Amino acid sequence: MQMPSTNTLYTYWNTIRGARSAPDRKDIDPTRIREALANTFILELNDEDKFSFRLAGSHLCTSYCRELKGRSFSALWHDRDQDAMETLIRAVTEDHAVALVTFQGSTALHTKTSFEMILMPLRHNGSSHTRILGGMTATEEPYWLGVQPITEQRITGLRLIWPDEMPREESMPDVAASVVNDVSFAPAASSMAMPTTLYGRSARRYAHLAVIDGGRN
């Protein structure tokens, strides 16, 4: 986690959940995450079994130059990344993992910037399948951000974290395979994981995707 707002949100989520796999929606006190609130969002499962924004902070809406409440979360992602994002969401809602994702956002004018995003399970009416607490922060803020809306985004790296358990590494190749299932890459690139280093941590490179091995922290 490189961004202060991501660390703030994760630390708060981890504190209020206690011994549970996920905190309850009613446990969240916005005043406790004031410094991260503008980058925070809550997703809810809609009638089409897809996640949409229930709440979205002001910095997020500014990045997309529109109100995100009620809009589809899945629709933000490039078509070739949507299977991977659905796999990540299942890991969060069903396995109670925390997903840390880096992605590149592009505008209609082909300007680009990078973001860090975190997704964490959240209980609502006893279920962890219908709500997700998240945060999204630009790793840099170019002059055009907030003037040119982000219209397309591609995953560049991901990490799954199980706060109370050892990582279930069998999930990672499945996600990686979904992300690199791109006809613009040679078959050999998507079938072989190359060792690399990202943010000082051991990682595996699958074409354009860097997968950081998960863990407890």
Image: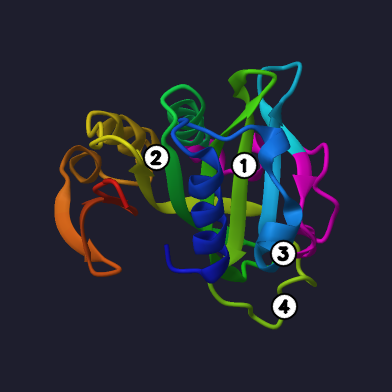
- Secondary structure category for the residue under label 4: loop
Q: Label 4: few (<14), some or many (≥20) within 10 Å?
A: few
Judged left or right of residue 117, residue 107 is right
Judged left or right of residue 65, residue 3 is left
Residue 109 in the image, given as x and y percentages of width and height = 69, 68
Of 87 and 43, the residue lying toward us: 43
- Identify the mark nearer the N-term, 2 or 3: 3
> Is mark 1 in CB contact (under 8 Å) with mark 4?
no
From the viewer's perspective, is the residue at label 4 or at label 3 nearer? 3
Q: Which residues are magenta?
A: 54-81
Q: Amino acid at mark 3?
A: Arg
Residue 75 in the image, given as x and y percentages of width and height = 67, 38
| For residue 96, above or below residue 127 | below
Look at the image and name its color scheme: rainbow
Tell me the distance, in whole angstroms, between the alpha carbons under discs 4 and 3: 25 Å
Tell me the distance, in whole angstroms, between the alpha carbons under discs 2 and 4: 28 Å
Residue underneath mark 2: 179
Tell me the distance, in whole angstroms, between the alpha carbons under discs 3 and 1: 15 Å
Residue 64 located within the stretch drawn in magenta: yes
Residue occupying the point 72% across, 35% down: 26
Residue 40 in the image, given as x and y percentages of width and height = 68, 54
Q: Label 2: few (<14), some or many (≥20) within 10 Å?
A: many
- Secondary structure category for the residue under label 3: helix
The label shown at residue 144 is 4
Judged left or right of residue 207, residue 86 is right
Tell me the distance, in whole angstroms, between the alpha carbons under discs 1 and 2: 23 Å
The image quarter containing residue 141 is bottom right
Residue 128 located within the stretch drawn in magenta: no
From the viewer's perspective, is the residue at label 2 or at label 3 nearer? 3
Residue underneath mark 3: 34
Of 48 and 154, the residue lying toward us: 48
